[in-house]
Image (spheres, grey):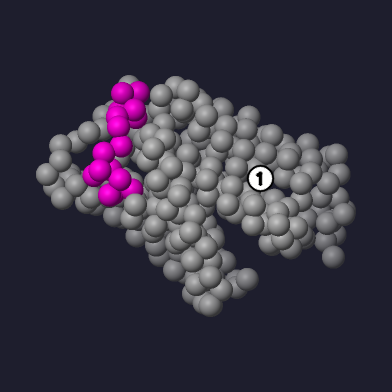
């Protein structure tokens, strides 16, 4: 039994808790807008303070994740900064593969999964840095296509180019891999999609962030529907997170516009390192 009354399961829907979750949603929504992640790994540990089942914490967090992603993507689309066709391809490919990954995860040991995602996240950091220093063409182009993105990311013209067959061919494997790993490891697709877009398609960090956030809308919809049918969503706390997330995503997408690509790279790298440490701790502790 938790010694703090405020952190008991009975108080998860109290007025004080709902206000607190509203501000948590603003914070995670801001981070989502800047880094293109769903924010579930930030919300779930916080909700677990109330000793509710992990499945309910995960399900409830998805409501906040969904509205955050919708809010941020809507602003990016209005500003002409969202490659929405690519986001749809990533999202649609990720939906079925997330279910496959979740099924595989159920057949595996939890500690092995936790350590595996930690290794994967660290590997992605080094791979992105390696290709950046090497200056090689993106993997998905075969080394023949000239750069189509503005590395300085100072105009919106780079985000409204049509989705070519080569983009489609590059986005398909990213969506499939990101969806599978998201379901397998239980992490948001953004932590996987952003570095894969940078490495495979050669996209700058800010373009990859915006595309990832758009794809998360579809992925979060699928997960929320599944959990709601199972009756695992706590709608009061979830709506508080969602409203806060929508506000925070507006702040985050505005901040993203003002930050340099290098600074966003640093923040995203710090996020991956933090998640890798968390997953390592989770593997040592065991679920």
**Residue at figure coordinates x 79%, y 44% from the top left:** 236
Give the total of numbered labels: 1
Q: Position of residue 253 (x, y in %)?
A: 50, 29
Q: Which residues are magenta?
A: 156-171
Mark 1 — residue? Answer: 63
Can see residue 107? yes
Q: Is residue 150 left or right of residue 191?
A: left
**Residue at figure coordinates x 26%, y 29% from the top left:** 150
**Residue at figure coordinates x 55%, y 38% from the top left:** 69
Identify the image quadrant of residue 116: bottom left
Q: Is residue 263 above or below residue 135?
A: above
Q: Quadrant of the N terminus?
A: bottom right
Between 15 and 96, the residue placed more toward the observer is 96
Q: Quick one: SS at disc 1? A: helix
In the rendered structure, does residue 128 fall within the stretch colored magenta? no
Magenta span: chief secondary structure: helix
Q: What is the crowding at mark 1: few (fewer than 14 residues within 10 Å), some, or many (at least 20)?
A: many
Q: Position of residue 160 (x, y in %)?
A: 34, 28
Q: Position of residue 118 (x, y in %)?
A: 45, 63
Q: Is residue 5 left or right of residue 218?
A: right
């Amino acid at each position: 039994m938790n010694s703090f009354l405020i952190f008991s399961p009975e108080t998860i829907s109290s007025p004080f808790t709902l206000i607190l979750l509203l501000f948590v949603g603003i914070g995670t929504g801001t981070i989502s807008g800047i880094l293109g992640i769903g924010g579930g790994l930030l919300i779930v540990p916080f909700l677990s303070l109330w000793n509710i089942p992990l499945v309910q914490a995960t399900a409830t967090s998805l409501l906040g994740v969904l509205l955050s992603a919708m809010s941020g993507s809507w602003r990016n689309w209005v500003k002409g900064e969202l490659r929405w066709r690519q986001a749809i391809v990533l999202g649609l490919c990720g939906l079925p593969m997330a279910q496959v990954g979740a099924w595989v995860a159920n057949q595996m040991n939890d500690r092995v999964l936790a350590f595996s995602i930690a290794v994967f996240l660290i590997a992605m950091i080094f791979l992105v840095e390696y290709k950046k220093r090497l200056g090689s063409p993106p993997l998905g182009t075969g080394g023949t296509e000239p750069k189509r993105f503005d590395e300085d990311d100072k105009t919106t013209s780079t985000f409204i180019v049509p989705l070519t067959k080569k983009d489609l061919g590059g986005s398909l494997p990213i969506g499939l891999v990101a969806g599978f790993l998201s379901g397998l490891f239980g992490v948001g697709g953004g932590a996987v999609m952003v570095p894969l877009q940078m490495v495979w398609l050669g996209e700058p960090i800010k373009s990859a962030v915006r595309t990832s956030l758009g794809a998360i809308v579809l992925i979060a919809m699928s997960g929320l529907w599944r959990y709601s049918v199972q009756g695992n969503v706590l709608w009061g706390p979830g709506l508080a997170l969602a409203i806060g997330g929508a506000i925070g995503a507006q702040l985050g997408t505005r901040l993203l516009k003002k930050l340099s690509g290098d600074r966003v790279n640093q923040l995203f790298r710090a996020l991956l390192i933090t998640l890798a440490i968390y997953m390592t701790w989770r593997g040592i502790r065991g679920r």
